[in-house]
Image: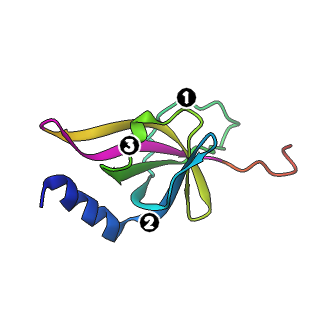
């Protein structure tokens, strides 16, 4: 078994079911690992311009298997997981030699707009 298949099998065991929407295209459900990045100092991926004391940015680390290439997605792509929606802030392939082993990315949770804010 090669390295990419070993990583894919571990993601299948540890991951949650997700799917990606990009324009009119919707992926089949697949497994990926999503982990909350909770450290403010090391997880600030874009400038914040919010009211004092409020921050709505929630970032997550995405790790997915080699057979779901997230580097080709458009800026409108949305990842759905457990009733939450995320947008990709960046995506990268992790390779060993010339073969992609898995994909990693930074997700930003999309905040729902309430009726009071509309």
Which quadrant holds residue 90? top left
Q: Local crowd at mark 2 within 10 Å, few (<14), some, or many (≥20)?
A: some
Give the x, y percent position of residue 98: 16, 35
Q: Is residue 31 magenta?
A: no
Per the image, label 1 sits on a secondary structure element best described as loop
Marked residue nearer the N-terminal end (2 or 1): 2
Q: Is residue 5 left or right of residue 40?
A: left
Q: Could you tell me which residue is drawn at 26 percent across and 65 percent down?
A: 10
Q: What coloring was used for the rendering?
A: rainbow
Q: Local crowd at mark 3 within 10 Å, few (<14), some, or many (≥20)?
A: some
Looking at the picture, tell me which residue is in the foreground, 45 or 16.
16
Q: Is residue 42 above or below residue 27?
A: above
Q: Which mark is residue 69?
A: 3
Label 3 to label 1, Cα distance in Å? Answer: 27 Å
Q: Could you tell me which residue is drawn at 31 percent across and 62 percent down?
A: 11
Q: Which residues are magenta?
A: 97-110
Q: Is residue 59 left or right of residue 118?
A: left
Which quadrant holds residue 92? top left
Q: Which mark is residue 47?
A: 1
Q: Main secondary structure of the magenta part?
A: strand
Q: Is residue 100 magenta?
A: yes
Per the image, label 2 sits on a secondary structure element best described as strand
Q: Is residue 111 left or right of residue 27?
A: right
Looking at the picture, tell me which residue is in the foreground, 90 or 35.
90
Give the x, y percent position of residue 74: 53, 33
Give the x, y percent position of residue 21: 58, 47
Q: Which residue is mark 2?
A: 16
């Amino acid at each position: 078994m090669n390295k990419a298949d070993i990583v894919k099998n571990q993601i299948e065991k540890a991951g949650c079911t997700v799917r990606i929407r990009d324009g009119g295209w919707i992926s089949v459900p697949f497994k990926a690992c999503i982990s909350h990045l909770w450290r403010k100092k090391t997880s600030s991926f874009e400038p914040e311009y919010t009211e004092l004391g409020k921050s709505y940015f929630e970032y997550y680390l995405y790790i997915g298997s080699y057979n779901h290439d997230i580097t080709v997605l458009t800026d409108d792509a949305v990842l759905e997981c457990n009733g939450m929606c995320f947008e990709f802030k960046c995506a990268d392939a992790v390779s060993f030699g010339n073969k992609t082993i898995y994909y990693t990315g930074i997700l930003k949770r999309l905040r729902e707009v309430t009726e009071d804010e509309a």
